[in-house]
Image (tube, rainbow, N blue to C red):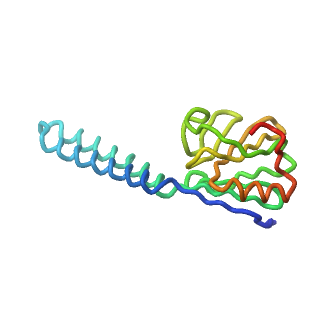
Amino acid sequence: METEILFEETQQFSKTGSRTITKVTCILFLIGSILILFTNSEDKVQTSIGLFVSSIISGGISFIFNKAKLIMQIRTDGIYVSFPPLRNSFTICYWENIDKLFIREYNPLGEYGGWGIKGRGNNLAYNVSGNIGIQLVLINDSKLLIGTNQPEEIASVLTRLGKLDYLTEQ
């Protein structure tokens, strides 16, 4: 059953960051290619294999940074979040499973170790930029933080729904 989408936000990693990773990948590939030319003949096969594997890994990382996006939806039945291509299906937090809900400032590196799908155990974050997010505390005591660049719009929608808890920590 499809529910009505009341708000949707899609975020991607900055183009500058994606370009930097692609440039670094190209530079590393070029350095590796030059090294192959100057190695001993018996080392060339191993060096070539290492360069190939490194290129595949670097290319995969570049691909993920260029394609990854955070999709968050507020719907009539709850909050939906996905992070394609790493997690294509939506994680759904139904309203009845949310104990507390507030918008807060956070430290991506200090609290979660960076950007992406981060965290440990029952304390996860989905984020790609910024330092403001929607904090969900579920009835099973697990926590989910979803980064946002539109906190005012989200606050407005959640207030209309009577779901935003202003009295908790922010």
**Residue drawn at 69 percent across, 62 percent down:** 8
Q: Is residue 131 left or right of residue 123?
A: left
| Number of numbered discs visible in the structure rendering | 0
**Residue drawn at 29 percent across, 51 percent down:** 26
Q: Is residue 111 left or right of residue 143?
A: left
Q: Quadrant of the N terminus?
A: bottom right
Q: Quadrant of the C terminus?
A: top right
40 and 144: which is toward the camera:
144
129 and 73: which is toward the camera:
129
**Residue 89 rendering spot, x and y as whole percentages:** 66, 56
Q: Is residue 16 left or right of residue 40?
A: right
**Residue 7 rendering spot, x and y as whole percentages:** 73, 63
**Residue 35 rendering spot, x and y as whole percentages:** 18, 41
**50 relative to 91, above or below:** above
81 and 89: which is toward the camera:
81
**Residue 81 rendering spot, x and y as whole percentages:** 68, 53
**Residue drawn at 78 percent across, 58 percent down:** 156
Displayed quadrant of residue 36 = top left
